[in-house]
Image: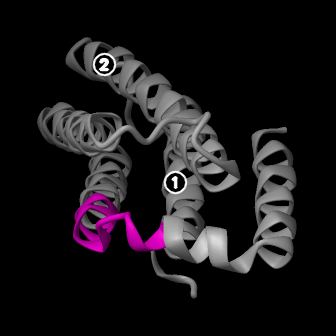
Amino acid sequence: MDMLFFFILFMLFMTGRREAPGLYEAGRLTLDPDFGGLNTLILLTSSWSFVMAVEAARSNRLERISRWLIASGLCGVAFGISKAFEYGAKFAAGLTPATNDFYMYYFVLTGFHMLHVMGGCVMLLIFWRMARREAFGPGRMTVIECGGIYWHMVDLLWIVLFPLLYLMR
């Protein structure tokens, strides 16, 4: 359902971009691709560390699961902090969702994505507590693997959002 929701938003954004290319290009030029690139690196690192947590569970290295989950969660928090700085700079410059269609889509798309990151961080905290109680292991993988699918979906959404908003001319 989440992917369908974002797909619809992506299509609406692209329709708006086609109808007002100058407005969308001017908006894109106000975004800092370094922030976007940093956020991409952070989220890819979080996905990698989640994969390492799943691998630790599969290999019955229970002491490593919680460390990798904390690493993923810290990456999620770092993403949130980076977005907070980025949003703060936009608001300080007087750019809000009401500024124009580009910024409306920018804040809606990245805001909904941020809500998914926050939900994922809560999930990671729950999984960390479960890992400390040794709830995961070779025969008990379903929950952590399903969580991994969600976390990777969040990263996949960003991998679409980053070029769509920050790079595409």
Residue at 79% from the left image edge and 51% from the top image edge: 9
The location of residue 95, given as percent across then percent down, is 43, 42
Instruction: Please name the residue shown 20% across and 40% down the image.
Output: 85
Work out whether 44 lies above or below 129: below
**Residue 129 image-quadrant placement:** top left
Q: Which residue is mark 2?
A: 125
- Magenta: main secondary structure equals helix
36 within the magenta span: yes
Q: Residue furthest bottom?
A: 169
Label 1, secondary structure: give it: helix
Q: How much space separates mark 2 and mark 1, taking CA atoms? A: 16 Å
Q: Which residue is mark 1?
A: 152
Q: Position of residue 126 (x, y in %)?
A: 37, 15
Location of the C terminus (image quadrant): bottom right
Tell whether 159 sits left or right of 104: left
Q: Left or right of 85: which side holds 150? A: right
